Image: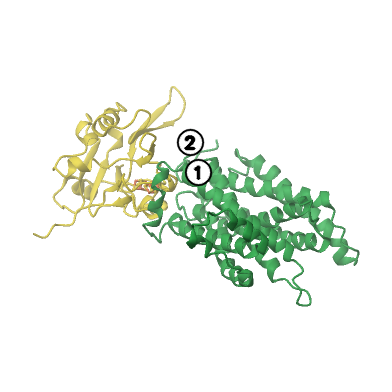
Chain colours: A green, B yellow
Amino acid sequence: MHEFNWGLLIVIYLFLGGLSAGLFFAAGLADYMTVDDKPVYARVARMGAFLAPWPVAIGSGLLILDLGNWYRFYKLFIHFRWESPMSIGSYLLTIFTVIAFLYLFAWLTADERQWLFSKVPATWKQVHRLNVDISSWRGKIAMVGFPFSIGVGIYTGVLLGAVSARPFWNTNLVAQMFLFSALSSGAAALMLAMVLNKKSPAEKHEIKFLVTLDVVFISLELFIILPYLIHGQLSSLAVKQALSLILGGPYTFVFWGPFLVMGLLVPLAIEVYELAPNIFKGHEFHGSRNLALTAAGLVLIGGFLLRYIFVYAGQVSSFHQMGMLN
Amino acid sequence: MAMKKKRYALVIDSRKCINCKACVVACKAENNVPIGNFRNRINEERKGEYPKLSINFEPEQCHHCAEPSCVRVCPTGASWQRKDGIVLVNYDECIGCRYCMVACPYDARYFNEEQGVVDKCTLCSHRVDKGDTPACVETCPSKVRVFGDLEDTSSRIHELLSTRRYRVKEPQTGNGPQLYYLL
Ligand code: SF4
Ligand code: SF4
């Protein structure tokens, strides 16, 4: 009955953009965390810095290919329209991507840097001038990058939330929901990478740091989703009808089952199960590898499903399909 | 010479509509609308059960909103509004992101697959600028559609809107739609 103007590529784009934002945020935070002035989470920060730029770069590429006229994408950058979230977002995403790559560069070891530049033809003198050690800038880059990573996380929600024609999106909670989901996916992806890294196995305190971070983000996300549902029920008829898409309508199952239970509550339970004995009883943190992998995997799937549900259900919602479900 | 301010709009007397779809065909021919796409449509609203069945036909197309949300969200300015209220797409600037389609509360836009751009009713601006009426208005055999300038106090649509009761669709969208349906 309704055709979708935005499809899976937009879902993937929103997910990957948020993922990068979350990875950068977690990496920067790990960069700042010190115990007795020692950077105990440096390996986490380095891993995060290595991963952060890629999802958003890939996502932006996909989005450009999804355009009706992909080669006209440069037009996004010869106009600036402050009323259009997509216009603001294009600039935000570009600046963030540059910062994320810069941050990656700052984390390269001298050897890695030499290897990288050995691939560049020797005659490209200008490029070789860039072969400088900027590792002392890490903290500063992370500091500048924080607001941009938050901005990207929020933007992925605002892109939908700012559309007044779609009552399912048009609440001021969607931006925060997407932000916390993005930060949580970032922490989870980092956990996944740390645990899967066979060469230098993750240490317990590193896993604990990421698990703690994820518990905080998932909890925040939950406490945005709850008000979203309650608020929607108490809102105008159009919003209430839009919400019925996930309260009895076609997106009910994927919202409550795969997303809310499997993608949020189960990983939260696993992570609390891991942390609680350590916090309340002073037991040692076990950091089970398999549990960490399961939780992280589920969080990532949940993050993807959240975008999926919102992009699709939102497009179905509108002001004029009053009897849409009966 | 100072130009007088203009505000084009359509008044639709939908009770006169017999669902002959001459306007839909005329629009497709006039504007070379691709197969499978439409710039205007006739909504059918059924009430009751046979034999006490009644159907209302309600022509709809772009409302040329006073506060068009499609224009607001367009990242390149390809969607724009003329001073006389007509909302248009500048095809050379359109990147085909379809944000405007998602943002239009009246589902008035379609995606032209071949050109990769978004398109919609132009209120036949090319005819209007020559002093003609839009093709759908001209062709309608039951005179459902009245086109005119709201600022012109001697116009037929000014007269209709000041003497008849009317409604606009979903004013709560905040878009200020400019298709006026007579009651
Ligand atoms: S009806 Fe839709 S396409 Fe037409 S002006 Fe209004 S928002 Fe734009
Ligand atoms: S599809 Fe074209 S007209 Fe519509 S918002 Fe994108 S650039 Fe603007």
What amino acid does circle 1 point to? Gln
Does B32 appear above or below A157? Answer: above
Please give left or right for residue A71 compared with residue B82 in the image. right
Q: Residue B172, how many percent across, how many down?
A: 42, 52
What amino acid does circle 2 point to? His
The chain holding disc 2 is A
Task: Say what secondary structure mark 2 lies in.
Answer: loop
Outermost residue on the left side: it is: B1
Disc 2 residue lies near ligand 1 with CB under 8 A: no
Q: Residues within 10 Å of mark 1 (few under 14, many from 20)?
A: many
Please give left or right for residue A9 compared with residue B44 in the image. right
Q: Are marks 2 and 1 on the same chain?
A: yes
Q: Is A222 or A130 nearer to us in this picture?
A: A130
Q: Quadrant of the C terminus of chain A?
A: top right
Q: Residues within 10 Å of mark 2 (few under 14, many from 20)?
A: few
Query: Marks 2 and 1, Cα distance to the nearest angstrom?
Result: 8 Å
Q: Is residue A25 visible?
A: yes
Task: Say what secondary structure mark 1 lies in.
Answer: helix
User: Which residue, given by chain and number where applicable, does mark 2 sit on?
Assistant: A2
Q: Is A119 or A286 nearer to us in this picture?
A: A119
User: Which is nearer the N-term, disc 2 or disc 1?
Assistant: 2
Q: Is residue A220 visible?
A: no
Q: Residue at x 31, y 52 (%)?
A: B80
Please give left or right for residue A2 compared with residue A230 in the image. left
Marks 2 and 1 in Cβ contact (< 8 Å): yes
Q: Is A310 or B78 nearer to us in this picture?
A: B78
Does A289 appear above or below B107? Answer: below
Outermost residue on the bottom side: it is: A36
Q: Residue B2, how many percent across, how many down?
A: 11, 60
User: Which residue, given by chain and number where applicable, does mark 1 sit on?
Assistant: A315
